[in-house]
Image (spheres, rainbow, N blue to C red):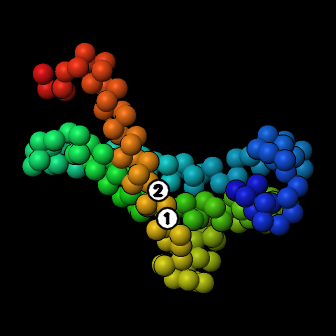
Amino acid sequence: TQMQMDNVHDKRFRGSFHCASTLAKEHGFLVLYTGHGINTIREGAFIGAYFYVYEGFREILLQHFGNPQSAIPVAGGLAGASAWFFSFPLDCIRAGVQGGNLQNSFRRPKATQVFASLIQKNGVVGLYSGVGPSIMRAFLVSGSRFSAYEGALWLLRGGRDRNK
């Protein structure tokens, strides 16, 4: 996040490794873990929703239509879009924590402060700023990801379906 912010303003980082090493030299190694707590919560919420929605929609679509070639990518796409929509507020908060001022470890924004600031400035809508493109991308990426995953499983089973 610091590197993304830098590309808008200063452009002092030449790449990911240079950014990480510079930040660690300037602020100490632990700066690399800024926002770790909120990011872990976000990842847990995302992964839980992702696989729950995928398995549910996969079964429903297979029962109603019986065509895995369309059921799997659609279920995967719905899973990705749903998981991103569900976890997006946490991602906005994470970005606010990681993109904040790193100069003083006591002044770095906390997740609760970022949340309150987003709500105060824009209301609940502020927690979903930019969600549209993320959901569209997630639908396409997740649909193809689950298709590849199920295709690999099918190959590993020797060309047999799951229940045979």
Task: Decide if residue 65 is on the left or right side of residue 96.
Answer: left
Q: CA distance from mark 1 to mark 2?
A: 6 Å
| Residue denoted by label 2 | 137
Crowd around label 2: few <14 · some 14–19 · many ≥20 (10 Å): some
Residue in the picture at 26% in, 42% down: 72
Q: Residue at x 79, y 40 (%)?
A: 17
Q: In the rendered image, which quarter is residue 29 located in?
A: top right
| Picture quarter with the C terminus | top left
Circle 1 residue: 133
Which amino acid is tagged 2? Arg
* Mark 1, secondary structure of its residue: helix
For the question of whether residue 52 can be seen, the reply is no
Image quarter of the N terminus:
bottom right
From the top left corner, tell me how far across and down residue 123 is, in percent.
51, 82
Res 66 seen here: yes
| Residue 24: quarter of image | top right
Q: Amino acid at mark 1?
A: Pro
Q: Nearer the viewer, residue 134 or 88?
A: 134
**In the depicted structure, whether residue 7 falls above or below residue 53:** below
- For mark 1, does the 10 Å Cα neighbourhood hold few (<14), some (14 to 19), or many (20 or more) residues? few
Residue shown at the point (85%, 58%) measured from the top left: 11
Q: Secondary structure at mark 2?
A: helix
Decide: marks 1, 2 in contact (CB < 8 A)? Answer: yes
Query: In the image, residue 160 lies at what x, y percent?
Result: 19, 21
Q: Which mark is residue 5?
A: none
List x then y, in percent, for residue 103. 86, 61
Horizontal side of residue 32 vs 141, given as left or right: right
Residue 110, quarter of picture: bottom right
